[in-house]
Amino acid sequence: MLQRFRDLSFRYKVPLRACALVVITACLVTVSMISKEYDELRSDLLSNSASLGRVLSLNLVAPLLHDDAWRAFEIISTPLSGEGDNPLLTAEVILVLDPQRRVYVSTQPTHFQMLSDPARVSPEFRIVKDWLAANTQVQPTQLEPPESDRIFVITPISADGVDLGTLVMQYSKSVFLPRFYSIAQRAALITLLVVAVLIPVSWWWGRRMAEPLVRLADGMAKVGPRIPEDREIALYESKDEIGRVGVAFRRMLGELREKENLEREVVVSDRLAALGRLAAGIAHEINNPLGGMLNAISTYKRHGNDDNDAFTTKTLSLLERGLLQIKNTVGALLVEAQVKSHPLSPQDIDDIQTLVLADAHRKQADLTFANDLRGVLPLPSTLVRQILMNLTLNAVQAVHPQGHVYVRAYIHGGSLSLLVKNNGTTIPAEVMPHLFEPFAHQSESGHGLGLWVTYQIVQQLKGEISVQSAPGETRFTVELPLPQDEG
Amino acid sequence: MARRICALLILLLISLPGSLIADGHPIRFGVTPVFLDDQLAFLAVWKAYLGKRLGRDVVFVQRGNYREITDLLRSGKLDLAWVCGYPLVQNREHMKLLAVPRFNGKPLYRSYLIVPGDDVGTRSILDLQRKVFAYSDPDSNSGYLYPQFALLQLEQDPGSFFARTFFTWGHRKVIEAVASGLAQGGAVDGYVWETLNLSHPELTGRTRVVERSPEFGFPPLVARPSLPQADFLALQEVLLTMGQDVEGAALLRRLNLDGFEAGNAHLFDGIARMARTVGGGSNAAALP
């Protein structure tokens, strides 16, 4: 049970605790109200009965002196004859005992008969008599026999110090009960009203308190193998502790996402680097025998037997064409950064536009070139042209007829930025991680080495290439740092 | 004092011929709680009636017991009083019989022995031995003298027969004491019991009449002997003719009486005999 409560959501636990607090408070207030009322009731009774006892005993002096039993009876009957008086303060029975502690008169004459021993009628009077034997009192005294539901108020009747008798007023504690019940009932009603008002308020308030915590917990629960996006997590914005935890949580999520991206990029670039090394190694290994073979064929063609028959010539041509194709392919894989070329000038960029224009026309694509370069940059023009050429041709191929291709070259923060975007086919998400790998996405129009080559060149130029593809826009961005002037 | 009043009255009678009673001090009428206690409203009407008939103010003087009324009458401070037959036979020289009420057609009444209504066993006063007994007044015939006499007739000592006795100083209160159970028996004026039985049956219903005594002379109205004859006659005339006018008849109905008659002293001979038997007269009130 306790465990179940412990496991309960704050959504319920906090309101439940608030409500429990309300109920406990209300109960305590009620109990203290009732007990206070009970005490007051009691002291009321005592002070009233004491003063009544004093008045009666004073009036009883003359009848007792004159042995006027009827007058004494009339006197003690007076307090009980009033109807509609507060029944609480009405004694059950009033007795006058003579000095021998026998009944002189009583208000219940058939019960407590004259001259009889009151203890025989009601055993509780044994205690009263014992008390009277042990005490010589002057003031009205209250006697509460143990295990009795009665209270006795005992008042001496004396004149000139001579004991004439004793007035005993017997009250029942049960007279408290109706009054007590009515008080308790009223208090309970007020408590219920208070509780009825406070419970919904405290429930609502408790839920409000718990809500940010619950949302935070819900948000945290979503973090698993996948890092949830910010918009998936609804947190309360505030400056309190929970708000701060929320802010920290968001920051943590952001960092997690960044780390995840970084790891992915590292994996991709590591793989690409490994591929690059493999490709370069293979290309070198192939290039040497290939050069030898091509030389041999060339030598044979130049210095060979003049009576070469047609068949031999045809065969050699076939071999040469095949070897050249291999050379081309290997050459494409092997990106040579050390190619001599002049520094990049704005004209180089414009040339690309001219070169691609034909393809664009064929595709009826709208090609926009924004060349912001205003001077010569210390970058190898051949390589930069190759990058831009590849990206722009890819873009033109990707757009649908009447599509748009936008190319821009500009200087940004010490780097040359090349931006190529189009509104053509979106690159599928599963292709993205392998986009720059060779032969990853062969199409009829190319061997799939364009992006690979581009990537290798950018790497060699210590630059960065990134791609974002969303429906309606695919953009490639290349950042090439401008080498610092040495010296 | 009395002589001066007489002289004044004679003077007034001379000066105002035709007036039945000369104007002078108001007529002082003593009543006891034995009979008419707590009937202030009735007394006010009766006072007005008597005053109108007499042409003089009437003042009712109420006292707590017979003795005080008797004393006042003896000392001339009252002109007339409604007393009991017992004081009359004890104070014949101080009281002059003025009128005797007629109850149930006769100037007679009885003493009732009553017990609480839930006591169904008691058959006679002998069954009340060692019980608590309520008397009305030590100068009352029905409420004291007769039960004492009855016990003596039964050869019992009235002073020790009961465990305890007390006086209530009023017949009605005897009935209340018995009805409440304070006393297990009581002696009461039969006329008072019957009258209350008509007006307050819920009270008398809680009592049961065990014994009814022989008939005695009804408690009479007496005058002081020194009251001028003219006043005496005028008062007697008014009382005896009360039933003849509407107002007087209504008052008599409220008193549950048929009327008043002049009566004669022999009506009370029975009481006088009992008083002699019991002895000691009113001074021998059986105080425990």
Image: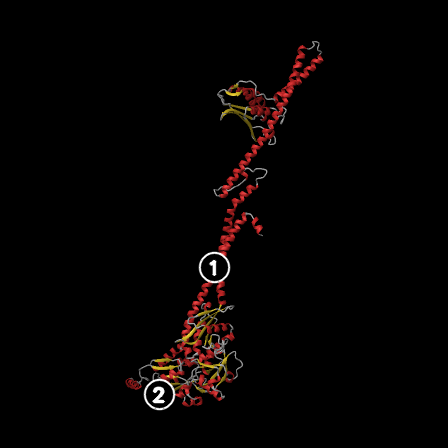
Q: Amino acid at mark 1?
A: Ser
In the picture as drawn, the residue positioned furthest to the front comes out as A134
Q: Secondary structure at mark 1?
A: helix
Q: Is residue B278 left or right of residue A405?
A: left
Reading the image, the residue beneath label 2 is B225
The quarter of the rendered structure image containing the C terminus of chain B is bottom left
Q: Are marks 2 and 1 in contact (CB under 8 Å)?
A: no
Q: Is residue A257 above or below residue A179?
A: above
Looking at the picture, tell me which residue is in the foreground, A198 or B131: B131
Marking on residue B273: none
Image spot of residue B36 (x, y percent):
41, 80
Image spot of residue A349 (x, y percent):
53, 21
Reading the image, the residue beneath label 1 is A32
Q: Is residue B69 above or below residue A123?
A: below
How far apart are the two marked residues, 2 and 1, measured between alpha carbons?
A: 78 Å
Name the chain under label 2: B
Q: Amino acid at mark 2?
A: Pro
- Residue B201 in view here: no
Q: Residues within 10 Å of mark 1 (few under 14, many from 20)?
A: few
Q: Secondary structure at mark 2?
A: loop
Name the chain under label 1: A
Tag nearer the camera, 2 or 1: 1
Q: Residues within 10 Å of mark 2 (few under 14, many from 20)?
A: some
Chosen colour scheme: secondary structure
Image spot of residue B186 (x, y percent):
47, 81
Image spot of residue B246 (x, y percent):
40, 80
Do the residues marked 2 and 1 share a common chain? no
The quarter of the rendered structure image containing the N terminus of chain B is bottom left
The residue that appears at 67% across and 12% down in the rendered structure is A301
- Residue B168 in view here: yes
Q: Is residue B275 left or right of residue A7?
A: left
